[in-house]
Amino acid sequence: MSDFYKKLKSIRLEKEIDLEEIHKRTKISLSALNAIEKGKFDQLSYTYIRLFLKAYALEIGVDPDEALEEFEVFVGNKTVSKDNKIEDEPIKSSKILFSSIKDENQQKNEEKKASLLKKPSLSIRTDIIKSIFIILTLVFAIYIILSINEEFEANKPKEFVSDFEEEGPISDLTLKDSYVKISETKQALKAVSPFSITLTTDRRLWYEIKSDDLVKSEQVLPIGDNHLHRFEDKINIKFNQTLGLNLYLNGNSLNILKSSIYPVSLIISVADKTISIQQYSPKK
């Protein structure tokens, strides 16, 4: 049960379903999908982790409710009883609590049975009919409420927030664990001081930037907007992806950058007089 995520990955591989296909259909990032298959749920946004797991399970043909139950067991929110049924911990606590008054309840039940035996048979039948009617009424009401809720949930459209809206910039740890550098392109730095780099994009973009001796910072570039950063000696920018991204160094376009759905790192070194582009791809 603890390595249920390995079973999910095994099912996906058996069905020859590519992670990139799931990424394109659900808009869930490849880094998030890799984290699910490795059981590294602490790398995912707490707000959307269950939506991601449910969507992933549906894509590989697994019951999403069973996948969510196994996830709850994995993170310690639920436990598995001896008959393999998942039970909430509060239920166990309530059983312990009620066991302390078992004798008292048993005595009351025995007194009630004794009083019922003393009633005439007609009165007993009347009470039974009334009880059955009340129970049937309650069951019907619960059925109606559940039917309305199911219809509401079925008609509600699925919404998957883009991974760039909740995950933030890709971290060094994620790059190390989930990706491998596949290429590095360099060209000579021909621009002269003062240096500035401008970012423009046609989609919302998260990135991490470190210039000169300043501390790393996380930035969000809205659709159609632009950011300008100045530096003197060195600048390092990591992008989750570069679709629709354009870079301009001192106002001139950097044609060295290619469009990619995977992480890309840009490094400009004045001392070395170089511009480096490092491209990454998910580990197999």
Image (tube, rainbow, N blue to C red):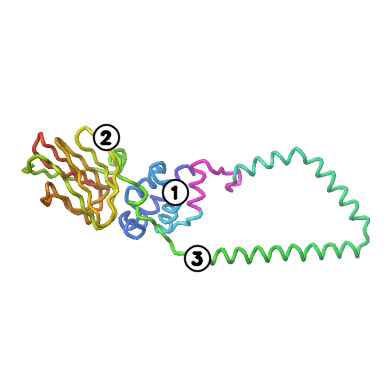
Q: Secondary structure at mark 2?
A: loop
Q: Secondary structure at mark 3?
A: helix
| Picture coordinates of residue 39, whole percent (x, y) | 41, 43
Identified at 30% across, 55% down, the residue is: 20
Does residue 83 appear anywhere in the picture?
yes
Q: Quadrant of residue 259?
A: bottom left
State how far apart marks 2 and 3 are (Cα): 47 Å
Tag in front: 2 or 3: 2
Instruction: Answer whether labels 1 and 3 touch (C-beta < 8 Å).
Output: no
Q: Give the class, few, some or many, for how many residues have Cα within 10 Å of label 3's Cα (few <14, many ≥20).
A: few
Q: Give the class, few, some or many, for how many residues have Cα within 10 Å of label 2's Cα (few <14, many ≥20).
A: few
| Left or right: residue 226 compared with residue 71 | left
Depicted 95 relative to depicted 225: above or below:
above
Check disc 3 and give the amino acid type.
Ala
| Picture coordinates of residue 19, whole percent (x, y) | 32, 54
Instruction: Answer whether labels 2 and 3 touch (C-beta < 8 Å).
Output: no
Please tell me the numbered disc located at residue 277: none
Please tell me the numbered disc located at residue 154: 3
Question: Can you identify the residue that label 2 sits on?
Answer: 215
| Picture coordinates of residue 168, whole percent (x, y) | 33, 46
Question: Can you identify the residue that label 1 sits on?
Answer: 47
Front residue of 123 and 225: 225
Check disc 1 and give the amino acid type.
Thr
Residue 86 among those drawn in magenta:
yes
Front residue of 37 and 204: 204
Which sits earlier in the primary sequence, circle 2 or circle 3? 3
Depicted 72 relative to depicted 118: above or below:
above
| Picture coordinates of residue 76, whole percent (x, y) | 52, 41
Q: Specify the segment rendered in magenta.
A: 66-87
Identified at 83% across, 48% down, the residue is: 109
Which sits earlier in the primary sequence, circle 1 or circle 3? 1
